[in-house]
Amino acid sequence: MAPPRNTLTAATGPRRFQIAPAVRRAVVLKIGISGPSGSGKTTSAVLLAYGLVSGAHPDWTPEECWAKIAVADTENRSAAYLVGRTFLSSALVDGKVAERHVTVGEFLHVPFEPPYDPETWIDLIRQVEMSGAEVLVLDSWTHEWAGQGGILEIKERLGSDWSHWAKVKPRHQSVKDAVRNSGLIVIGCARSKTDWAQEQYQDRAGATRTKPVKIGLKTDQDSTDDYEWGISFRIEHATHSASTDKDRTGLFVGREDHVIGPATGQMLSAWATAGHGPGSSFWT
């Protein structure tokens, strides 16, 4: 016996689906970056954002590119400390990765103080969309989940009963939907819960010694957070190099970890707009 239709389809008949060959369309990138404190998430995100804009607009001046980047800063305005600093970083030169000095210009800075309730995050995204920016860096995305007035605090105020999540999760989902549906490229920086390990090394005399090393564990956000990003980078504290936990682009599959720079953004911009995939000449 066939299961009954729901009342909507019973009244209107079967839904009609469009069936056609798949078309590769331009992608509005959503990128996650996680790592322990001091691993370089903010610097990596800002240089990545610059590469994304300069890759999309190769004829623009650096000043024009920086003006299209907005950083929502929940970290006591620390992102502004980067302005004017120069980094030796990767960039694309004649289609190849090369090291170049990059000076951080005047991006759009959005100091973001608590409370970090879901509706305020949505207001933030909408206002940055209207500012004319092309890339939004959320630093730190962790505060939406675990910050003052964030999701965990909202749930705690309601009480310990598990059923209260039914009231909280839709508000959390509304923020994730705002990120996913935004016309902005979004880079979300999230803290990793940290631990310490002992690492062996050889000193100048050749003796084997040990030193404590900070390591990142689980990302301090919703356990389903990785689903929101097309690509997720995880940064290692000691070397500031990034590996990929998730990569829908295929650009980083089988590649060694690397320090994120403008070249990373330029490669991702080219893939998003023109469809570069694995085996691209960027890596050769």
Image (cartoon, grey):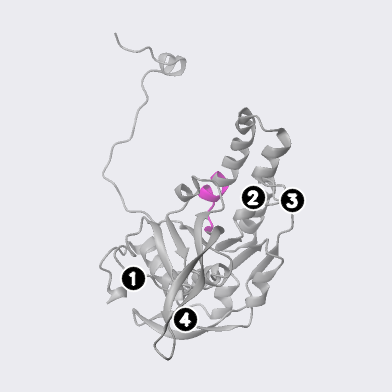
Query: Mark 2 — residue?
Result: 146
Q: Position of residue 266 (x, y in %)?
A: 42, 71
In primary-sequence order, the first of circles 1 and 2 is: 2
Q: CA distance from mark 3 to mark 4?
A: 35 Å
Residue 115, disc: 3
Q: Which residues are magenta?
A: 177-186
In primary-sequence order, the first of circles 4 and 2 is: 4
Q: Is residue 252 magenta?
A: no
Query: The C terminus is located in which quarter?
Result: bottom left
Count neighbours of disc 3 (C-alpha within 10 A) and say few if under 14, some if 14 to 19, many if 20 or more: some
In primary-sequence order, the first of circles 3 and 2 is: 3
Residue nearer the viewer, 203 or 89: 203
Q: CA distance from mark 3 to mark 2?
A: 11 Å
Count neighbours of disc 2 (C-alpha within 10 A) and say few if under 14, some if 14 to 19, many if 20 or more: some
Is 252 drawn above or below residue 63 in the view shown?
Answer: above
Q: Name which quarter of the figure residue 274 lies in.
A: bottom left
Q: Residue at x 36, y 21 (%)?
A: 14
Query: Mark 4 — residue?
Result: 89
Q: Residue at x 36, y 55 (%)?
A: 248
Q: CA distance from mark 1 to mark 2?
A: 32 Å
Is 71 drawn above or below residue 115 in the view shown?
Answer: below
Inspect the image, locate mark 2, and give the three-letter code of the amino acid beneath it.
Ala
In primary-sequence order, the first of circles 1 and 4 is: 4
For label 2, the SS is helix
Q: Is residue 183 magenta?
A: yes
Residue nearer the viewer, 101 or 53: 101
Q: Position of residue 120 (x, y in %)?
A: 69, 49
Query: Mark 1 — residue?
Result: 256
Inspect the image, locate mark 4, and give the three-letter code of the amino acid beneath it.
Ser
Q: CA distance from mark 4 to mark 2?
A: 32 Å
